[in-house]
Image (tube, helix red, strand yellow):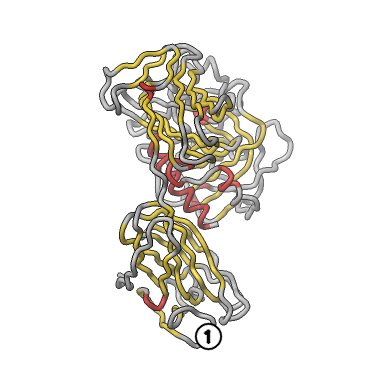
Amino acid sequence: MRKHVALLGAAGLAIGLLLPAAPASAAPVRYEAENAAISQGLVEANHTGYSGTGFVNNDNVIGSSTQWTVNAATAGTATITIRYSNGSGANRPADIAVNGSVVAAASAFNATTNFDTWASKTLTAPVTAGSNTIRVTATSANGPANLDYLDFEVAAAPPATVYQAENATISQGLVESNWAGYTGTGFVNVDNAVGSYVQWSVVPAAAGSTGLTIRFANGTTANRPMSITVNGTVVSANQAFNATGAWTTWSEVTVNATLTAGTNTVRATSTSATGGPNLDKLTLGTVGGGGAPTAAELLAKVGSCNQISNGRYKTDSDVATATIPVCQKTGAVLWQADMDIDCDGIRTAQCNEDTDCCFLPDTACHASNGSALNAAQLPYVVVPSSSSIWNYANFQIGCGTVVAVIYNNQVLYAVVGDTGPTQIIGEASYATAAALGINPDPSNGGTDSGVTYIVFQGSQRVSPIENQGNAVTLGQTLARTFVNSN
């Protein structure tokens, strides 16, 4: 268990030509750049190899842009391919925005052999049914690359399949309907016992990775964890089902798993004597709960380190050598370290002076009612207090900033909730550890390695900070932008 130091408070374009829409899953529709809305640029034809009647040469200034208006037959994830040439010899980065939201910040348009040589850049982004705008905006004084066309294709997400809990196999539990807000004909109230469970038999549209979304209510003040298994194999050993505030307030958790063709069993089993939450339904959807990146996608973007810390951090006070740098990618800072358990804040059965030798009754960040955070209930991450090594506040990070915590092929979206020693890194709340299947005991829990922390920079914060559902929603969006931008 890490000893804490004193807490520190965390601190108008015209519309381009609209071409006919492509049906879902059809061949891509091509939108020529010369028919798009151009800000600070011209249509030219003085280089060879372009498609259509020409290409767009934007001015060499920050902010020059080309915006296409495209049409999607259905909402879903679009594959966007931009053809460009860049004979300048250097990258000409640009922001790519969909419907006004940047989905790839300062995205690289690397040099081609010359301006007669063309290359393609492909990314994915969520779009709505109907009209959507896609804008490429220069982020350097060199302007963007020459733009030839944009290919646009939407693979609509397969319809989700819903399985009601009251129709599942129930061991040690009852179907009830005494709390409002459920779907179907009722919900399952499993017994307050280790081993009580609900098991669904599900048939996916196809074999492969699938998002398993469980709707639940937990009117207590504490997490009621469950083990999630698929076909007998554990996919989340101690999945958190955190308090929702009332038995009539429902929330969702999503776990990614691989399903086989045909019938699969999905079981949620209580792992504590308090049993699990009330369970409403299981929904099969796309991986990551609607387009959020998988752990593998995120980890693929953090293989190299652009170090921004002035030095390195230790993982524990008794470690002799500081080995952990803080690194930066587009839109986020990150570190790869251990996880020690933070149990500070509200006194609970899990976190108090008796369970934690170094317990402090406060956290640097506070809940909407002004109280300290509840480490046993809220997934949050501890950042090092500002020092000469690194100052998190200088990187648009503060209370409520979303953090993607990755461990054992799982992604958990937490918030920045506390500050710790100036020379040590790698710490998160009891609830964070429990949700990832890490021993959360503040006296002997945690893990020595294998944890990646991706902290998303910017002004967006989870509000109220204690709302885990809001953290997941915002985190999934920021994570997809991170993957597209790196």
The residue wearing badge 1 is 47
Q: Is residue 42 visible?
A: yes
Residue 201, x across and y down, in percent? 46, 26
Judge whether 122 appears above or below 310 on screen.
below
Q: Residue at x 51, y 18 (%)?
A: 271
Quadrant where the N terminus lies?
top right
Judge whether 433 appears above or below 151 on screen.
above
Residue 231, x across and y down, in percent? 55, 27
Q: Residue at x 54, y 40 (%)?
A: 208
What amino acid type is highlighted by mark number 1?
A: His
Direction from residue 315 to residue 441 in the image, left or right: left
Q: Residues within 10 Å of mark 1 (few under 14, many from 20)?
A: few
Residue 20, x across and y down, in percent? 33, 67
Quadrant where the C terminus lies?
bottom right
Q: Residue at x 45, y 47 (%)?
A: 291
Residue 52, x across and y down, in percent? 44, 79
Image mark count: 1
Viewer-closest of 222 and 239: 239
Direction from residue 28 to residue 99 in the image, left or right: left
Judge whether 3 appears above or below 334 on screen.
above
Judge whether 295 appears above or below 249 on screen.
below
- Residue 186, image quadrant: top left
Q: Is residue 399 visible?
A: no
Viewer-closest of 483 and 222: 483
Q: Residue at x 38, y 33 (%)?
A: 162
Tell which residue pokes out farthest to the front in this image.
262
Q: Secondary structure at mark 1?
A: loop
Tell which residue pokes out farthest to the bottom in this image.
46
Viewer-closest of 248 and 121: 121
